[in-house]
Image (cartoon, helix red, strand yellow):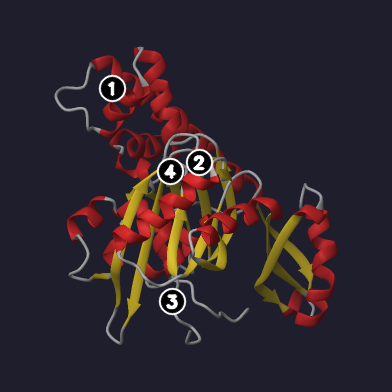
Amino acid sequence: MAEGKLLVGVDIGASSIKVVQIKESRRALSIIRHAHVELPRDTIIDGHVMNPSVVTEALQEVFARAKITQKEVAIGVYGQSVIVRKIAMPLMTKEELQESIGWEAEQHIPFDIKQMTFDYEVLNRFPEEQRMDVLLVAAKRDEVNDVATVVRDAKLKPLVVDINAFAMQNCLEKALNGLPKDRTVAIVDVGAANTTINVLSRGTSAFTREIQTAGASITEEVRKQCNLGWEQAEAYKCGSQGGLVPQDVNAAIDLACGHLAGEIHRSLDFYLATSGEADITRIYLCGGGASLAPLSRAIEEKARRPVEIFDPVSAFAIDKRVDEAALRARGPQVAVALGLALRRVKEVRT
């Protein structure tokens, strides 16, 4: 492998697996392969692999569908066992930081440090104040190993393990030609089982949060309120049932979207209250939930900030081998996979 070669992005979500392969040229980055495969319910719960053999088979199937032969991949992890903290530390050299980061991690990670794998990156240095901001990221070692194992069992090579919140941040940075340095924005990914929030202030991640209310919660609310089976409730939510949607179903969808929007709003308000930032100027919405018009309206109404449906595909050229219509229809759902596909074999720590 040549140093710096792009990896295949593999997003293993609660309801499906998405893969994207990108090719780099002098003129543009092009999406040259893409596919997705649905997963049975409860195959993955809050990032935990509950049925490894099903995930391994789905990975093999999705790579076959996409006709991807490259084995080197970047994978993402998410869920309540993933910890992200921005911490203030005294100004020090790289060598001094490397020696002291373990002790710092123990103070900020609410789990036994022996059970965790962690990494860090210096965000900002303030020489005049003799301090610096460091981003500390940790995940339970067993859960990372579980995901990596099913990927290896599918005859793939996981060379990079990223956090989903940072993968979608990388994708947004590419789409905007750089993150805004003069204002604060948020990117919100509403998946099937988790909603991931990443607040970006002055070009860096300032706050992340995982909410265990997401697309499946909306389906469950419709199921209970309207006395429907899960599949029928899901079909109504996704607009694939056909015909007119009953009024009580629309009301249940609106109610559930309002609940989720309220949780997103409270998370953003918590960040503002604890950070001292003036405001969040825009919310970028992606994931499967981005296709729900009542959800984007509810977030805009409750958060009182403009919401933009984030279409990550627009930042890339699309190869003729890709089903462009299918890819664009799923555009907001591939933000994490695209962000992972921007990772490389060897990257230098800053």
Q: CA distance from mark 4 to mark 1?
A: 19 Å
Q: Nearer the viewer, residue 24 or 91?
A: 24
Q: Secondary structure at mark 1?
A: helix
> Residue visible at 30% across and 42% down?
291
Q: Which residue is mark 3?
A: 6
Q: Nearer the viewer, residue 253 or 179?
A: 253
Which SS class for mark 3? loop
| SS class, disc 4 | strand
Quadrant (top left, top right, bottom left, bottom right) of the C terminus: bottom right
**Lower position in the chain sequence, tag 2 or tag 1:** 2
Instruction: Tell whether 325 sits left or right of 183.
Output: left
> How far apart are the alpha carbons under marks 4 and 3?
26 Å
Residue of label 1: 250
Q: Which residue is mark 2?
A: 194
Distance of label 4 from label 2 (alpha carbons): 6 Å
Residue 151, horizontal then vertical, whole percent: 52, 59
